[in-house]
DNA sequence: GCCAACGTTGGC
DNA sequence: GCCAACGTTGGC
């Protein structure tokens, strides 16, 4: 089983939105590196729900991959913000995975704290700040979960 | 709002 | 295939 970190701007889709919906398609990914990581995701993998461009940004909780790589319909919808007129219908460029809400951290883990922890200094989050979907090592996973679950 | 990092596009 | 110009992400 693998661990991931997936970013969303809470203004458009937050962990509370996912908590309400229970499951949702992680659509709108328009970056090849991020897409390729999604392609390798398996049912049962776990992911951190990361709030980006937020105040503050950080890890908000956990979700589970419950549906593997499939076509993202928003790429074909001209009214959608993520419409991609260059994506051929026969070979769609973009895909999504389906995620299920698992938990919202009692203690939100802001990026400022992540940066302060030596065990997390090699996180992809800090090295490749613009990558919206990225792998997380088991050690990093345990560390972040411990931070998120501690009572404030 | 600024700006660094970096992905994408398009001319050659 | 190179690379300059441009656009986007995302922290601050």
Image (tube, coloured by chain):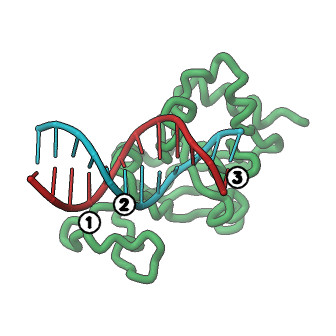
Chain colours: A green, B red, C cyan
- Residue placed most toward the observer, A45 or A144: A144
- Chain of the residue on which disc 1 is drawn: A
The residue where tag 2 is placed is A95
Q: Locate residue A68: give its quadrant.
A: bottom left
Q: Which label sits on residue A54? A: 3
Question: For the residues carrying marks 3 and 1, which lies nearer the camera in this image?
Answer: 3
**Who's the residue at 69% across and 46% down the image?**
A57
Q: In this view, does A40 lie to the left or right of A27?
A: left
Residue A23: % across, % down = 58, 63
Q: Are there few (<14), some (14-19), or many (20+) residues within 10 Å of tag 1?
A: some
- Residue placed most toward the observer, C11 or A15: C11
> Residue at the top extreme?
A118
The residue where tag 1 is placed is A92
Query: Is residue A114 depicted above or below A59 in this figure?
Result: above
Q: What element carries label 3?
A: loop
Residue A91: % across, % down = 20, 65
Query: Is residue A81 among what the camera can see?
Result: yes
Query: Is residue A45 depicted above or below A141 in this figure?
Result: below
Number of numbered discs visible in the structure rendering:
3
Q: Is residue A55 left or right of residue A121?
A: right
Spatial separation of the CA atoms under disc 2 and disc 3: 25 Å
The quadrant in which the C terminus of chain A is found is: top right
- Chain of the residue on which disc 2 is drawn: A
Spatial separation of the CA atoms under disc 3 and disc 1: 31 Å
Q: Are there few (<14), some (14-19), or many (20+) residues within 10 Å of tag 3?
A: few
- Pointers 1 and 2 in contact (C-beta within 8 Å): yes
Q: What element carries label 1?
A: loop
Q: Locate residue A14: give its quadrant.
A: bottom right
């Amino acid at each position: 089983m693998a661990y991931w970190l997936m970013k969303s701007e809470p203004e458009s889709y937050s962990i509370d939105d996912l908590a309400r919906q229970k499951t949702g398609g992680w659509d709108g990914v328009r970056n090849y590196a991020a897409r390729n990581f999604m392609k390798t995701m398996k049912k049962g993998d776990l992911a951190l729900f990361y709030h980006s461009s937020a105040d503050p940004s950080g890890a908000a909780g956990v979700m589970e991959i419950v549906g593997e790589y499939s076509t993202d319909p928003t790429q074909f919808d001209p009214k959608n913000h993520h419409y991609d007129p260059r994506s051929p219908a026969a070979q769609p460029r973009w895909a999504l995975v389906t995620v299920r809400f698992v938990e919202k951290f009692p203690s939100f883990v802001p990026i400022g704290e992540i940066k302060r922890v030596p065990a997390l200094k090699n996180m992809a989050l800090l090295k490749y700040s613009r990558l919206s979907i990225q792998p997380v090592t088991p050690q990093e996973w345990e560390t972040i979960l411990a931070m998120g679950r501690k009572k404030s």
